[in-house]
Amino acid sequence: MHTFIGIDLGSTTTKAVLMDENMEVLGRGITNSRSNYDTASRVAKHEALINARFTLFRRAFAELPGVADRLDALLADLERSFRLEQFLEELGELERTCIENARGDRFAGKERATREALEAVFATLRQEAPALFAPGAKRKSDFFRDIAGSRFMAVAEPIGKTSGLGYDLLLNVYDKSIIEVENRPPSGDMNGRFLRALRRLLDGGADLGVAQGDVMRTVQGALDVALEETYVVGTGYGRVTLPFSKEHIRSEILCHGLGAHIMYPGTRTVLDIGGQDTKAIQVDPNGIVENFQMNDRCAAGCGRYLGYIADEMNIGLHELGPMAMQATRSVRINSTCTVFAGAELRDRLALGEKREDIMAGLHRAIILRAMSILSRSGGVRDQFTFTGGVAKNEAAVRELAKLVKENYGDRTININPDSIYTGALGAAAFSRRSVENGATGGVS
Amino acid sequence: MTATATAAARPAPKTAAPREAIKEPSMVKQKEMIAGNYEKLATAKAMGRKVASTFVPGNLNELIMCFDLVNNLPEINAIQNGLRKKSGQLIVEAEKRGQSEDVCTYVKSDLGMLAKGNIGPDGRPIPSPDVLLLSYTGCFTFMKWFELLREQYKCETVMLHVPYEGEGKVTENMRAYIVKQLREDVIPTLERVSGVKFDIDRLREYLRESARAEEDLVWTLESAKHKPSPIDAYFGGVYYIGPIFTAFRGTPDATEYYRLLRQEVQQRLDAGQGPVTPEGELSKEKYRLVVEGPPNYTSFRDFWKMFYDEGAVVVASTYTKVGGTYDLGFRHDPDHPLESLAEYCLGCYTNRNLPGRIDMIEKYLNEYEADGLLVNSIKSCNSFSAGQLLMLREIERRTGKPAAFIETDLVDPRYFSPANVKNRLESYFQMVEQKRRGAGVAAAAAVH
Amino acid sequence: MSTSDIVARCTGLFEDLNFVYAREWKAARPGRKVVGYMPFYVPRELIHAAGALPMGVLGGGDQLEVIHGDAYYQSYICRIPRSTVELGVTGRLDFVDGMLFPSICDVIRNLSGMWKIMFPKTMARYVDVPQNFRDDVGGEFYVNELNELRKDLGELCGRPVDDESLRHSIALYNENRRLVREVYAFRAAAPWKAPSSEVYLLMRAGMVLAVEEHSRMLGEYLEAALAENRPRRDNTRIVITGAFCEQPPLSLIKSVELAGCYIVDDDFMLVNRWEKANVPLEGDPIRNLACTYLHGSMSTSAKYEPDLSKKGLYLVDSVRRNRAEGVIFMAPSFCDPALLERPMLQNVLAAHGVPFIAFKYAENSGQMAPIREQAGTFADSIKLWSEA
């Protein structure tokens, strides 16, 4: 099967979308951008390929009689099992790397003790891994670095103490190793991993409602479909150092506009508020960009501003919106300057304003800034698609909806739960289009 | 505020393209001229010559020559320091000495240079001026700039107030006001400072010479109407306006420079060649742009490269009109010497009102058959920048052609973010291209 | 009327971003016109003589949410043009028949042309003033410019402006300026009786009220303020400079006072006392306006000082005349005229032994804590220094 890939390298996360010839999305993948865009691209692509397999499984299972009402549960089980399998493999690699790194002057005379301590840590991590991927288990992040890191620290602390090696020493080994592991391109036999995951599931006695042999055959059949990487297009703010040649790069503005159009074909105006910038894009009925504006040199009012506020208040970024929703009134905030965010906040608190009301004011201030950029680009037309991290913030969305109505009247506002993939989706569409226009070959 | 670069600072080609291996005669000529003027400045005191400082817009070079004064243009020094990557530290120096981070960086580069011993871009000291000719044309900051310099040099300062074309036209009152200031204030002051008596026939002679060069300059700029354009009217244009905007207008040297330039451009035109870039000839013209606003000088070469790498050629620019709008028909006129100097000052680009500027850009987009407008908004220069976002909107509305907006500064390296500028430029170029291809291709994307 | 009644009236006018007073004034009689002007000098007498109401448009303050105005300006440009555009785009100035843009800086200058494009039904004019102060040169130029404006305003208002009505207007404005100067002098003499936050609002009222009404109000305020007893504090007497265009938020003026400063002079709204003495009534009124501009008007950053030895002395004079102990440089962010003038003025002050501090604001600044702290420290240090 021909596939077309779009990769969006963001400053914090890298996203990939895999598309088939009919422009159906097969898979999506996301990873943290690291400092290595090359690896980040590979990992995101790898994740998208994994995700694509699940799409193929779904298609194949759908044709299996009697599975329809269990399809979702079955795929969810399979996915958890696969994630566990993947996690354990990565854990194994991290352990090997840690042990290799526990050498040199610092470890003189302690090599063995360190090795044993590390083995003990990883044994515990392996032991508790199935619980992490059990049905209903909540993980704060799906990135290996985050899960492994937080558990490593929790487990290594007592072991470091009792072994007499000290926590710092183990942490030091971990820090060094995780970077190495993260920057290694994804490897291993993916199909084998799927089969092992399935085997684990079946051995666990899961009731699939259909014959095990049918399940195995179906999965094997889906795995046998070759996913040929026909063309890749990259985009994103990191494009200056994108690991692609020029023909394989499209501007993030164009990708965003097209991506929003594919998600909502009625889209005429797109607003994206990301961490580092805010973009307003006007597209024609075919998703072609007609005009765009970005925040100027001053990054006031971008997502990062909320990050500063969250840091200042010592709460999580995702808690800001709900807090603002509790406001009874909105405090007027006139500056969204990130430099002064903390001072502004402290000033307001000192004046006795409620945190919730200040939060409501801050969200309004950010959206006011975005409204100006929209105005600069030509206003808000119907339909209006809102993307980026801030689109997940309900308080921001509420203010935006209010201001759009006040200034432009009734507009359909689209917010897609997968909006983080908008740029990558557009890039994948460009990838498909490039081939249509006669570009050949060209995996980077 | 505004000014021009000069051939002296032209970056050497990275790759030894055959065409660039042989320096074009006009470039050699300009380089000699610039070096000659810095030489005159460096030796002025020793030679007993007096020095006048003045600005590019409203530059009265012919008049200054009538008094045997050497013309020093602080804007050009700031540009030269920018091109040589020296301006950053000069600006910081001026800020350390109390200038606000908010204000014009040309001024701060100049004040910083003064604070550090007034060593010019060529490494030799710039002499203290004997007179500051404050031609107050199209920029409010000019007045503060020379007041600040006067505070340091404590030298004679003469104001030439050029009224703003608020209603988009030159009135008799404006012209008469300038002529009177020239007669009653400027000329007597220059006579007193120089000890040379004013001779109007000498002025007429210089003005006659100016008009000759102006003719060839306009021809050169308008050669960009051809497809492909044999010149880049912004990055290349900055060099082409060098002599006429600075200390050479009215000299036979300038006339000769423009004659050589015209010949060279004619040859390129005949051969169907594109503009010369630092990396050789631009062979495939992909986008034709009109640019509003000055360039960035601290990363001039990198900035230019972002254009020529994409096949983008600037076919007309407003920056090349800051020192005179010759392409709109103005010529210095020996038969009406003072009136013609007044007309000249009044017509400088930033002395025209916003509607007039928009009309000019619209005309350029149509006459030069450009794909769109690009605004390079300069942090330092409110005269240019305030209102550019309206210009953008208005031009899009009138022409239906796409416009884009980038932000940099003239000589403050802190305001040039390459990734940011490149990102926007590429988005813009791709948008132009996508629009050009039309809806047909995108329709495929709509099916999903 | 008590001062608080008057101040309450002024506060209402100050907070009204819909300009109800001017709207009602205009509606009261058919054919009436309103001509707006941005801060700084314009010849208001000409507008008045044409039968129109001159109305100061001094930005949006700290209560206006600016959306569309921001769309027209880069981040490195001051606030006032954005909020002014916002006022226009949101229809708050839809009743204004003409807008005058004073000669103050490149931003406001360019806004005159923007206004022509954005609001083509409104007469928008840039008001150029001479930077040459000779009667036969700059004077002649200005006489002609004023006559040009007189003609345009006459056409706008449907009646030519004759000399007699112009003289009448000049007389009314002479009286208004006399009273403004008197309030300023009263405050300088007894600042505890006329707090600057009140004086400011009183002067702001003069930007929107009919001149006769404002003059009455000034008289009433003087009378009431004189009669009231208010506690006198041991505050430091300071002069504020740099705030001649974009206005500081009222809370900033209050903060400076709360921090222990008596503001004994300032350069807010210079237009209301631009001419330092009465414009003569006899003779050609236009020539009189021009001559007063050349030889009898305030000095400030936007005006050229031909004589180096006099540069900045206007500020030293103000300090001396008002017995001030220090100067606060208070400029809007990105204000080229104020910020480029500042170091020169500071040098002059230093040479005359006048202490100063400097900070920046925007019309919508929200954080007052740092202002209070700086102004308070400045006031205290002057006290300590003078006691030592």
Image: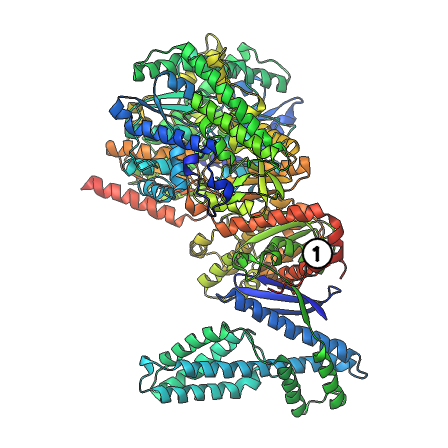
- Is disc 1 placed on a helix, strand or loop? helix
Tell me if residue A381 comes above or below residue A23 in the rendering: above
Q: Quadrant of the C terminus of chain C?
A: top left
Estimate the x, y position of residue B242 in percent, counting from the top left. Answer: 46, 30
Tell me if residue A257 comes above or below residue A94 in the rendering: above
Q: Which residue is mark 1?
A: A261
Residue C346 or A124: which is nearer the viewer? A124
Chain under label 1?
A
Residue C284 or A230: which is nearer the viewer? A230
Give the residue type at disc 1: His
* Point 45% across, 56% down: residue: A345
Estimate the x, y position of residue C244 in percent, counting from the top left. Answer: 43, 32
Residue A169 or A280: which is nearer the viewer? A169
Residue B224 or C257: which is nearer the viewer? B224
Residue B292, image quadrant: top right
Estimate the x, y position of residue B395 in percent, counting from the top left. Answer: 63, 36
Disc count in the image? 1
**Can residue C238 be seen by looking at this rendering?**
no
Estimate the x, y position of residue C224 in percent, counting from the top left. Answer: 42, 30
**Can residue B72 be seen by looking at this rendering?**
yes
Q: Residue furthest top?
A: C283
* Point 46% across, 13% down: residue: B338
Residue C111 in the figure: left or right of residue A311: right
Mark 1 packing: few (<14 Cα in 10 Å), some, or many (20+)? many
Q: Residue furthest left?
A: C388
Tell me if residue A426 comes above or below residue B342 in the rendering: below
Report the coloring of the rendering.
Answer: rainbow
